[in-house]
Amino acid sequence: MDPGHRKATGRTSKAGATTTYVSEVASTSSRSEPNGSRAPLRDVPADAGRRGPARTPPLSRPANGAKEPQEKPQGRAPRARPGKPCVRGNDARLPAPPGTRTARARESPAAPAPPAAPAPPASSLCARGARSSRMPRARAPKPSPDPAASAAPGGWKPRAVLERLRLNRDEISAAAQVVNRVVDRLLRRMQSCESEFKGVALLNTGSYYERVKISAPNEFDVMFKLEVPRIQVEEYSDTGAYYFVKFKRNPKANPLIRFVEEEILSASKMLLKFRKIIKEEIKNIGETDVSVEKKKPGSPAVTLLIRKPEEISVDIILALESKSSWPASTQEGLPVQSWLGTKVRNKLRQEPFYLVPKHAKEGNVFQEETWRLSFSHIEKNILNNHGTSKTCCETDGVKCCRKDCLKLMKHLLEQLKKNFKDRKEMDKFCSYHVKTAFFHMCSRNPLDSYWDPRDLSLCFDDCVTYFLQCLRIEILEHYFIPKFNLFSQDKIDKTSKEFLSKKIEYERNNGFPIFGKF
């Protein structure tokens, strides 16, 4: 049977609350990610609730008291960035990344002008993972306060915003205790001998373990992984992301054989039974006020709502683990060669891949038997080992502002979704979109020096510029599956992308007043 021609069912998905592409713990309005999930709290990271020591700048910075211009710019001028353009043969569709910054005075950013136009021809696009041609900045040693802590162009203060986003250690510990108690109870039930899911184990992924969680510890993701040996996957409708799952053999001893229909492992049937076991066990938990939320069409998660001591939402996601080679659609993905190195890429591709019961959508109905690829564990690895230097951001290593830029990008989208929660144009945007754009920025600007903490406002502006370009040309390639466009017309309509683009432009031109709301 040709999977691309398998008839879509008119049934709605049996999943829980939306948590697509999981791996994010954002606010309730922007929590979902196309292939990640919010991670449970097992151990509080050592640096939660505090920042690492500020490194001594090797070169001079603006004199004490120097401030950025305070007037509200009407646009932004592109910065001059010399360097020989390089060609990305297969990626001419992608927006041109913000180029390498030349030596410049931090205290005097370029005068504002209209944003950059959409992608230039392929000849001007940088090669995937090509190293930045950024020129070193010449400074004479002169101690001074970190300019990133002072006002950025437009008057907003990046460090002050990040300080407000920092999680409270006591709140994290309290939430962890409650969440872990419920999750451990469910895990023991799943592992009981009469359960079809007795081989499940926890997979710790998501923004908490990536250490980019923002706001409050009130939403978490838990992934229950289940190893399924000897399976084969068949790509659904040339998507690159959605697959039918079949067993190479169907032994009667296989507890999952009851979920097989016409040789295909049914995602909807497995999710239905997974949800049923959770609902039954939740009724037996008397010491915690917890309930199961109504399922939402197309979602792979079973969502729990814990009401005491604080309201906490927990998404539980079933994930099939395969230790086979990654599907062919990922062959050109994960472009970290010039950033983390070819050896690191090869090692990451030797890790298992996961399939979550997220159904492909055909028009207004869902194909309920499909599974979607998930690489949330690889995303966690990348973010926790994100520097060209192996000691980047370690206690005694050189610091960078990569994670700070991601936190600000996530916060920007989260605030906009809150501010325009009644507008349907914002419904389909999620933190995974900005996370994907951020990964592409890291690949295009791999050097740690590009992400100098003293350039935080400029690096953040580059990330915003790239995200706007993706919105304008309606292309945001999945970081692991290049042919899967997260901004395609069938996923997010042009009107919604234009709406978000205008709101981001307004915020950037006026010093991000949205950061002061809520």
Image (cartoon, rainbow, N blue to C red):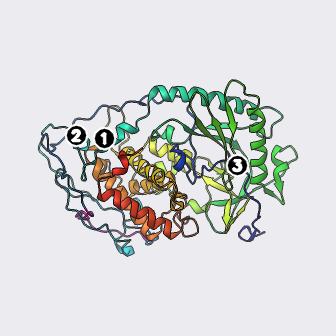
Which residue is at the front of the view, 419 or 150?
A: 419
Residue that lies at the very extreme toward the right in this rendered image: 252
Judged by depth in the image, the label closer to the viewer, 3 or 2, is 3
Q: Which residue is mark 1?
A: 159
Is residue 75 inside the magenta stretch? yes
* Amino acid on which disc 3 is placed: Lys
Tell whether label 1 touches label 2 (CB within 8 Å): yes
Asked if residue 131 shows in the view, the reply is no
Query: Which structural element holds mark 1?
Result: helix
Residue 203 left/right relative to 246:
left
* Amino acid on which disc 1 is placed: Arg
Circle on res. 295: 3
Q: Residues within 10 Å of mark 3 (few under 14, many from 20)?
A: some
Q: Where is 103 relative to 200, above or below?
A: below
Give the x, y percent position of residue 1: 78, 69
Q: Residue at x 56, y 29 (%)?
A: 176
Circle on res. 146: 2
Report how far apart the C-alphas of labels 3 and 2 lie in the structure.
48 Å
Residue that lies at the very extreme toward the top in this rendered image: 287
